[in-house]
Image: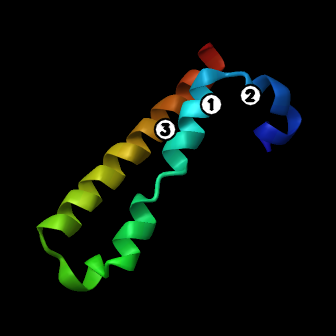
């Protein structure tokens, strides 16, 4: 909803661009495609950790959108 009301302003914002780039990562898709829920091996744990870090960065970027 915020994007639809301020699209031009948000597209010019570097933090918003970083947030969208982080959201566009394929970590969740890769986790699902390789069947990590069935395997639960070291790679699955690494993907889970990466996903957690990515989402924390997305949240952090979302907080900074208003400050730039």
CA distance for labels 3 and 2: 16 Å
- Circle 2 sits on which residue? 10
Residue matched to label 1? 16
Separation (CA) of disc 1 from disc 3 = 11 Å
Q: Mark 3 points at which residue?
A: 59
**Residue 9: quarter of image:** top right
Across and down, in percent, residue 35 comes to 31, 82
Please state if 20 lies on the left or on the right of 43 as rendered.
right
Question: Does residue 42 appear anywhere in the picture?
Answer: yes
Residue at the image point whose x is 74% and y is 29% from the top: 11
Which comes before the other along the chain, label 1 or label 3? 1
Precedes in sequence: disc 3 or disc 2: 2
Compare residues 58 and 21 and report the one nearer the observer: 21
Q: In the image, is 12 to the left or to the right of 39?
A: right
Of badges 3 and 2, nearer the viewer stands: 2
Question: Which image quadrant is residue 48 in?
Answer: bottom left
At numbered mark 3, what does the secondary structure look like: helix, strand or loop? helix
In what element is the residue under mark 2? Answer: helix
Q: Is residue 9 above or below residue 55?
A: above
Q: Can residue 62 be seen?
A: no
Question: Is 66 positioned to the left or the right of 56 in the image?
Answer: right
What x and y, as percent, mark residue 64?
55, 22
* Residue drawn at the location 25% of the way across and 86% of the way down: 38
Which residue, as the protein is rendered here, is positioned at the far bottom?
Answer: 38
56 above or below 46? above
Within 10 Å of disc 1 (Cα), the crowding (few <14, some 14-19, many 20+) is: many
């Amino acid at each position: 909803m915020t994007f639809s009301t301020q699209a031009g302003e948000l597209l010019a914002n570097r933090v918003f661009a970083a947030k969208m780039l982080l959201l566009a990562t394929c970590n969740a898709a890769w986790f699902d495609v390789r069947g990590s829920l069935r395997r639960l091996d070291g790679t699955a744990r690494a993907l889970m950790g990466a996903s957690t870090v990515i989402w924390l960065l997305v949240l952090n970027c979302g907080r900074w959108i208003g400050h730039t």
